[in-house]
Amino acid sequence: MTLTNWLRHSGMMLLMLLSGMAHAASDSIESPAGTREAQLSEMSQDHSLPLNQRVAATIMLGNYSGTNALIAVGRASRSQHTELRIASIDAAQRWQGRAKWDVVSPLLDDTEHRVQSRAVRALAPLWSKLPDSYRRALDPAIDRQIAASEDTSDGRLEKAWLYRMRQQYQESEQLLLSEWQSFEQPRVAVALAELYRDTNRQPLVLDVLEQGVAAHSDSALLHHSLALTYWRAQQSRQSIDHMRQAYKIEPRNAHYAYLLGLMLLEAEPKQAITLFETAYVQQGTPQYLYSLCEAKLVVAEAATNCLSQLSKYYPESAITSLTRKYSNIRNIN
């Protein structure tokens, strides 16, 4: 019962990942998480530190959404240093809704093209959910980005992606089909599959991905995309097979390790724990650590050290709630 309940929760977590709905942690200054947030905020704003350290601290603030993080990232977005402004976008990209918009939208008109381009990429995925007044601010920046896209494979793929984000599906499909007929590259197949998914043409999603993997069996990108497609269709065996293959091809990809861990929880919980550990060591994402701690609690492994690390990112109330949840389940059982 314990594992089944958690798997239901993990399945939702995976679906949230597929939908891009993961949230940053937040907390007050008194907790370890709040203390870490405050330290990073100070580093981000400390003009005596080397610029690369300030940039790194700013990006890491994307893991938090407390007042200190909001202020520091906001200030970085107004910095005279281009790299800090880009770092502020990287941080805010992990946030949701208004906080992301408030930090990034002023940078749509930045004097530096690299900053403008990064801002457009961060905000374009929000387009379908934005009110008209926000779209009117974003549309000219998207138009500029489309016009500036080079006539290369990269440029055409970016243009097709921007059209898709703005729900100009016909324009996007024309570009991608032309590119697919000319090159049949893995990333073109994935882009087409995403377009077909957005337009509810599910049979075509599998068709183009299967064609792609038949031509490029060594493409981790294609196996990863197929794994997620099968997972959405609740075909877990095929999903796990392709996720294993993606991870085998790119064993240093923390995201692949993490997703494979989520998929293996029911059949191989110990292996899932190992994969969560690997993912966290490789990338240090708080969400990976949270899943690791929770998995250890589910299978009754020692989790004290894991929870201590987790307290650097999550509020004490969240840690207490997590441990109490599985303590109560064990008592019921």
Image: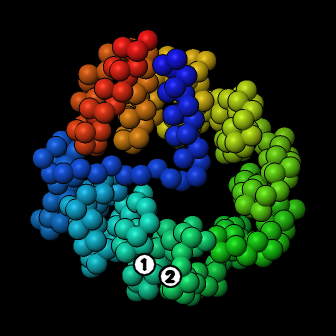
* Mark 1 to mark 2 CA distance (whole Å): 9 Å
In which quadrant of the rendered view does residue 176 lie?
bottom right
Q: Which mark is residue 105?
A: 1
The amino acid type, in three-letter code, at marker 2 is: Tyr
Of 5 and 133, the residue lying toward us? 5
Name the residue beneath numbered marker 2. 134
Residue drawn 49% across and 38% down?
Answer: 254
Q: What element carries label 1?
A: helix
Residue 197 shows up from this direction:
yes
Look at the numbered disc 2 and give the secondary structure of its residue: helix
For badge 1, the amino acid type reads Ser
**Render colour scheme:** rainbow
Reply above or below: 278 against 213: above
**Looking at the image, residue 98 lies above or below residue 281:** below
Q: Which residue is drawn at 59% across and 24% down?
A: 264
Q: Do the residues labelled 1 and 2 touch (CB within 8 Å)?
A: yes
Left or right position of 60 against 101? left
Q: Which of marks 1 and 2 is nearer the N terminus?
A: 1
The percent coordinates of residue 183 (x first, y second) are 82, 59
Nearer to the camera, 326 or 291: 326
How far across and how far down the image is residue 82, in percent?
A: 34, 74
Which quarter of the figure is the C terminus placed in? top left
Where residue 295 appears, as percent x and y from the top left, is 44, 24
Q: Which of marks 1 and 2 is in front?
A: 2
